[in-house]
Amino acid sequence: MSAEEEHKKLFGLGDPPDQNKAEKALEHALDIRKFEINLYWERAKYFWALIAAAFAGYFAVLSADHMVDKNFNAFVIACVGLVFSLAWYTTNKGSKYWQENWENHVDMLEDSITGPLYKTILYRPNTEKGISRVLKGPAPHSVSQINQWVSLFTVIIWFPLIFNVLHEFEICYPISIKHAAVGVVTSLAIVLVLFGTKSNIVDGHRHLMSKKRTGVIDE
C-alpha cells in the first residue's frame, strides 16, 4: 500500500469510502488551520511588544546623561533583544510548519467533498501596466514569509548594536566578568532556542496513564 493510499484509508477516502469520516476530517483540518493562523498573529503581537520595548530601552539608556555604566546596561538589553528576536524567528518557523501541515491535510481531503476549492486560484487579469502594475497590482507574496524575513533581519540588527557598546578588545585589558557572564547566558539561551525546542509530536511518543480509583468505606 502506497503512502497516499494509506492516507486515504485513514481519513475515509479509501475503498470503501466513509463520507462522514472524510467530512469530519476536513472540517477539523480547516478549523485547526484557522486556529493556527490566529495563534500566529497573537504570538507576533507578543514578540513585537517585547522587541519594541528592547529597542526603546537600548536607545533610552544610551541617551541618558548621568547613568552609571550605561554601556553595560545597553549591552544587557541588546542581549535580551537578541534572544527575543531569535525566539520570534524560530516561532515563525514553527508556526509555519504546523500551518502547512493542516493546509496539506485540506489539500488531500477536499477533492471528494467540496472539490479542489482550496487548491484552485482565481486572479484578475493584468490590465495595468508598467509602474502602476508594480505598485498597485496584487502579487502572490507569502505574508508569513515576509514576517519571517523581518524577524531574521531583527535578529541580525542586534549584533552591531551589541558590538557598539562593547569596549575594543585588547590583550592588555582584563576580561569583564559581568560582560562574560551575560554573554555566556545569552549564548546558552540561543543554543536552547535553536536546538532544544523541537516538538516531540514529530517523532512520536508513548503516553503514561494514571487512573484514579474512588470508593466508599464503611465506618
Image (cartoon, grey):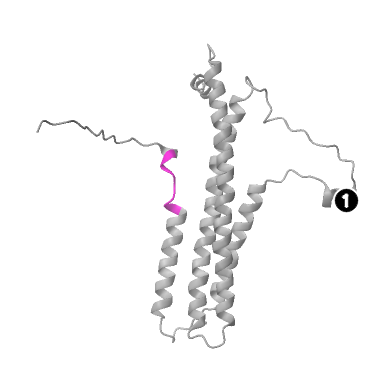
Left or right position of 218 against 82? left
Mark 1: amino acid: Ser
| Coordinates of residue 154 in the picture (x, y in percent) | 60, 62
Judge by depth and name the residue closer to the eye, 85 or 159: 85
Q: Is residue 196 magenta?
A: yes
Residue drawn 24% across the image and 34% down it: 212
Q: Is residue 135 magenta?
A: no
Q: Is residue 13 visible?
A: no
Residue drawn 11% across the image and 30% down it: 218
Number of labels in the image equals: 1
| Coordinates of residue 194 in the picture (x, y in percent) | 47, 54
User: Which SS class for mark 1?
Assistant: helix
| Coordinates of residue 78 in the picture (x, y in percent) | 52, 70
| Segment colored magenta | 195-201
Judge by depth and name the residue closer to the eye, 218 or 1: 218
Judge by depth and name the residue closer to the eye, 171 or 92: 92
Quadrant housing the C terminus = top left
Residue drawn 56% across the image and 34% down it: 31
- Quarter of image, res 123: top right
* 5 up-or-down from 183: above or below: above
Judge by depth and name the residue closer to the eye, 208 or 210: 210
- Quarter of image, res 89: bottom right
* 1 up-or-down from 212: above or below: above
| Coordinates of residue 122 in the picture (x, y in percent) | 77, 33
* Residue at the limit of the structure toward the top, as seen here: 16
Q: List the residue tagged with mark 1.
A: 132
* 32 up-or-down from 83: above or below: above
